[in-house]
Amino acid sequence: MSEPIVVPLAQVKDALKAPRPRTLPIQAPADALPASALPTDTLGRPLHDLRISVTDRCNFRCSYCMPRHIFASDHEFLPHSELLSFEEITRTASIFMQLGVRKLRLTGGEPLLRKHLEMLVAQLSGLQTIDGTTPELTLTTNGSALAKKAQALKDAGLKRVTVSLDALDDAVFRRMNDADFPVADVLRGIEAAQAAGLGPIKVNMVVQKGVNDHQIIPMARHFRGTGIELRFIEFMDVGSTNGWNMAQVLPSDEIRQLIANHWALEPIAPRQISDTAQRWAYADGQGSIGFISSVTNAFCGACNRLRLSTDGRLYSCLFATQGHDLRALLRGGADNQTIQAGIHHLWSARADRYSELRSSHQGAIERIEMSYIGG
């Protein structure tokens, strides 16, 4: 093992603020830090997961994420030159591996809109964690292109997928995605992913009271016994454009009771303390469901995730107000030790716990949009 990396803090801060010049070729990461030097934040949380947004574009206009009146046809998305290249993403991920990251999740926007995404998957699947193991490589998608892409993604090294699906009723689903996209095509994508072995598959349903809450039981009935875990997500105040209103939040406890009225449920112990979902099993052995309750039952205390935007900014919370410019380091001539030190410093100073403090923040901040940094 090498000695801990020491880089003057002023140099790191200056690099983070630097202008954005030419692209650098990918470089081998520095030697791993000793386990004792791996970063924990001010609340003692380790860095474990990196969520990577590969595009800010999406072909859906879901009101809770990219409402059409904001993201209209004239909306200017990032030009390709502003996006991190696959080589830059892979270089970044390799550095994160040396800081203790063991899980990589590709997000968007809609990640399958990024051309040749399977090439990035192949590069990332060749990395190793600090323990010498292969990182858990996953992807979250709206499923619209999954039927075409599932096998290629699996062949490239993707482990599993999570699919967003908010209704089974076609009219409700088309209205919610606001792109007239049929639910049947998403279901075909889920079937293709299952056939390709991209599992265990998870399906995420964002529940809005008065919008799609009548779809809870049909969704549960559809995925029971399939080996696919349906997860119900409380409507969250991510970003500043989705018109979030507490009156549209259906608490997870109420959703679980609705389902328990049809099928008996039993609690499942979490796989790890940082799991975002509380999981319950059907008592008759027909699978499990999950509940992500950021609004009514905050889980900030175990959050171990950092987010990388498609243009190379790091965000330490889903509800962040600002990012930290990593791309300036990648394209500004910084070596991997400097970048590693910058990330180490950023995480070590982290104190985010927005969901636990939500009531004190209402109306006071302008948050980053979820489509920009992924869910």
Image: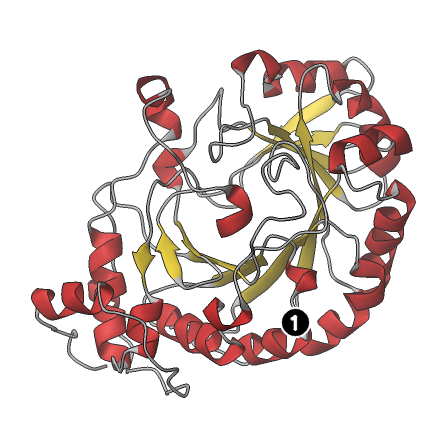
Question: Which is nearer the eye, 106 or 83?
Answer: 83
138 left or right, relative to 86: right
Q: Dot 1: few (<14), some (14–19), or many (≥20) neighbours within 10 Å?
A: some
Quarter holding residue 280: top right
Q: Position of residue 289 (x, y in %)?
A: 70, 34
Question: Which is nearer the eye, 256 or 96?
Answer: 96
199 left or right, relative to 218: left
Q: Is residue 260 above or below residue 310?
A: above
Quarter holding residue 221: top right
Q: Residue shown at 44%/76% (left/top)?
A: 88
Q: Position of residue 16 (x, y in %)?
A: 23, 64
Is residue 176 visible in this depiction of the protein? yes
- Quarter containing the C terminus: top right
The amino acid beneath tag 1 is: Leu
In the picture as drawn, the residue positioned furthest to the front comes out as 74
374 left or right, relative to 170: left
Q: Position of residue 46 (x, y in %)?
A: 32, 52
Quarter holding residue 66: top right
Q: Residue shown at 28%/78% (left/top)?
A: 332
Q: Residue shown at 30%/38% (left/top)?
A: 352
Q: Residue shown at 53%/28% (left/top)?
A: 236
Residue under pointer 1: 117
Give the colouring mode of the picture.
secondary structure
Q: Is residue 48 above or below residue 353?
A: below
Q: Say what secondary structure mark 1 lies in.
A: helix
Q: Position of residue 373 (x, y in %)?
A: 49, 50
- Quarter containing the N terminus: bottom left
Q: Is residue 147 above or below residue 317?
A: below
